[in-house]
Image (cartoon, rainbow, N blue to C red):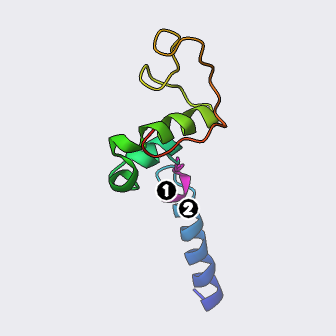
Amino acid sequence: MSGRGRRLAALDRMVRRMERPESVAATALTAPDILAAMTDPDLFGREFGGPSWAPWRAFLAAFFGLPLDAEQSPSTERTPGATLRPWRRVGRRG
């Protein structure tokens, strides 16, 4: 086999490896949402995961359209007449 033939055979093997479904190139990576990133200890959880950041997490959930849990959602029983204003400034301490 000539040098050109060996190079073409090697290239053909590389292309076949890349076309396999279990190839690393075929797997899709997903990014966490902002709340998951803030509470994951491997990302920012050590800095933003504490209870003093709860108002900010509620604000960001409303801002990004993520579901709010019972603690985060505004309740008329808890605050009569209050309306949700996601543009309101939220301090770190609430």
Image coordinates of residue 44 in percent, x first then y, are 40, 55
Q: Which residue is depicted at the point 46% across and 51% down? A: 22
Q: Is residue 7 left or right of residue 41?
A: right
Given residues 57 and 36, the one toward you in this image is 57
Image coordinates of residue 48 in percent, x first then y, are 40, 50
Residues under numbered marks 2 and 1 in contact, where contact means CB atoms less than 8 Å apart: yes
Task: Kindly state the secondary structure of the residue where label 1 is placed.
Answer: loop
Image coordinates of residue 33 in percent, x first then y, are 52, 42
Mark 1, Cα crowd under 10 Å, few <14 / some 14-19 / many 20+, is: few
Q: Amino acid at mark 1?
A: Ser
Image coordinates of residue 61 in percent, x first then y, are 55, 34
Mark 2, Cα crowd under 10 Å, few <14 / some 14-19 / many 20+, is: few
The span picked out in magenta is 24-30
In magenta stretch: residue 81:
no
Task: Kindly state the secondary structure of the residue where label 2 is placed.
Answer: helix
Q: Which residue is depicted at the point 60% across and 42% down? A: 89
Q: Quadrant of the N terminus?
A: bottom right
The residues tagged by marks 2 and 1 sit, at their Cα atoms, a distance apart of 6 Å
Q: Which mark is residue 18?
A: 2
Given residues 15 and 33, the one toward you in this image is 33
Q: Is residue 70 left or right of residue 81?
A: left
Q: Answer with mark 2 or mark 1, whichever residue precedes in sequence.
A: 2
Q: Which mark is residue 51?
A: none
Q: Amino acid at mark 2?
A: Met
Position above or below: 78 against 49: above
Q: Which residue is mark 1?
A: 23
